[in-house]
Each structure stands twice: as C-alpha cells, then as structure tokens.
Image (cartoon, grey):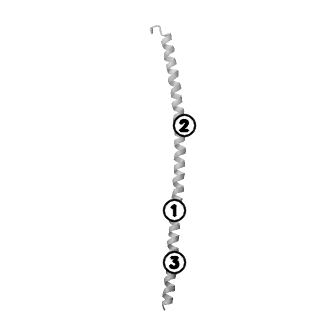
Amino acid sequence: MWIVIAVAAVVVLAIVLVAVSRARERRLEQKREEATELRRQSEAKLQRSEHRSSVADDLAERARLERREAEVAAQRADEVDPDVD
C-alpha cells in the first residue's frame, strides 16, 4: 500500500513540476513578446523623431536664408532711400 502512495506522490510531484515549468515558459515567452513589441514601438518612435528633426533642420536653414535675404533687402532699401543717411 505504501508503494502505491509513494508512486502516486511521485507522479503528482512530476505533474506539478511539469506544470510549473510550462507556466514559467509561457511567462517567459510573454515577456519576450512584450519586449519585441516595445522594441518595435521604440524603433518607430526613433524613426519619427529623426524625421521630425530633419524637417526641423530644413526649416531652420530656410529661416536663416530668408532672414539673410530680408537683411540684404533692408540694406538695399537703405541704400536706395534718399532719406537714410
């Protein structure tokens, strides 16, 4: 009788260990999937930010050129204006 109980206990213990191991593997896989998704989102945000930075740089350069053109135009207006000494 004790042998049957011991065998049953070993079988139950083995089933519990397998179940715990599978649950752990499922949790690990979920964490891997979450990490993959976070990396994908991070990469997308990085690409958007790099694009926006590039657009901002272009706009800043255009603003500098327009400012310089305005300065040149103002200087030319001062040269042409007979009332400016």
Q: At x 53% / y 36%, what residue is drawn?
A: 55
Q: Tell me, yes or no, whether the two marked residues, 3 and 1, touch with CB atoms within 8 Å.
A: no
Residue 15 at x, y percent in the picture:
51, 78
In the rendered image, residue 6, in percent from the top left (x then y), is placed at 49, 86
Measure the C-alpha gap from mark 1 to mark 2: 36 Å
Q: Amino acid at mark 2?
A: Ser
Nearest to the eye among marks 3 and 1: give it.
3
Amino acid type, residue under disc 1 in the picture? Gln
Q: Out of 52 and 13, give the one closest to the viewer.
A: 13
- Quadrant where the C terminus lies? top left
Q: Residue at x 50, y 24 (%)?
A: 67
For disc 1, the marked residue is 30
Lower position in the chain sequence, tag 3 or tag 2: 3
The alpha-carbon separation of the residues under discs 3 and 2 comes to 58 Å
Alpha carbon of mark 3 to alpha carbon of mark 1: how far? 22 Å
83 sits to left or right of 32: left
Question: What's under tag 3, amino acid-wise?
Answer: Ile
Q: Earlier in the sequence, mark 1 or mark 2?
A: 1
Which residue carries the number 2 mark? 54
Residue holding disc 3: 15
